[in-house]
Image (cartoon, rainbow, N blue to C red):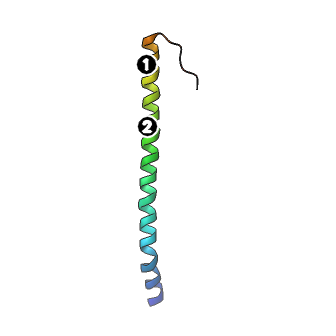
Amino acid sequence: MDFFLNALWSVTPTVLVGVIFWFIVAAILRADRTERKVRSRIEAEERAKAGLPPARS
């Protein structure tokens, strides 16, 4: 039983660092996606104000 407890304690830091890293990367990707969406919406509004045709994708 002592072997399994030692194995659990040795793997725990790696798993925790991996989970924290995953949350950070997910937050960065979500922020980038949101920023791109907002930027394209603002650009479309500005093009409409200037009387320009919609931008091509």
N-terminal-most mark, 2 or 1: 2
Query: Where is residue 48 shown, x and y percent of the image?
Result: 46, 14
> Which residue sits at x=58%, y=26%?
57
Query: Where is residue 4 shown, x and y percent of the image?
Result: 47, 85
The answer to whether residue 1 of the structure is visible from this angle is: no
Secondary element at image label 1: helix
Residue extending furthest toward the top: 51
Could you tell me the amino acid type at mark 2?
Thr
Q: How many marks?
A: 2
Name which quarter of the figure residue 42 lies in.
top left
Residue extending furthest toward the right: 57
Q: Residues within 10 Å of mark 1 (few under 14, many from 20)?
A: few
Residue 1 or 13: which is nearer the viewer? 13
The answer to whether residue 24 of the structure is visible from this angle is: yes
Above/below status of 50 relative to 27: above
Q: Residues within 10 Å of mark 2 (few under 14, many from 20)?
A: few
**CA separation in Å, label 2 and label 1:** 17 Å
Residue extending furthest toward the bottom: 2
Query: Where is residue 12 shown, x and y percent of the image?
Result: 43, 74
> Which residue sits at x=44%, y=44%?
30
Q: Which residue is mark 2?
A: 34
Q: Which residue is mark 1?
A: 45
Query: Where is residue 19 shown, x and y percent of the image?
Result: 44, 62
Above/below status of 52 relative to 37: above
> Which residue sits at x=44%, y=29%?
39
- Dot 2 and dot 1 residues touching (CB under 8 Å): no
Secondary element at image label 2: helix
Could you tell me the amino acid type at mark 1?
Glu
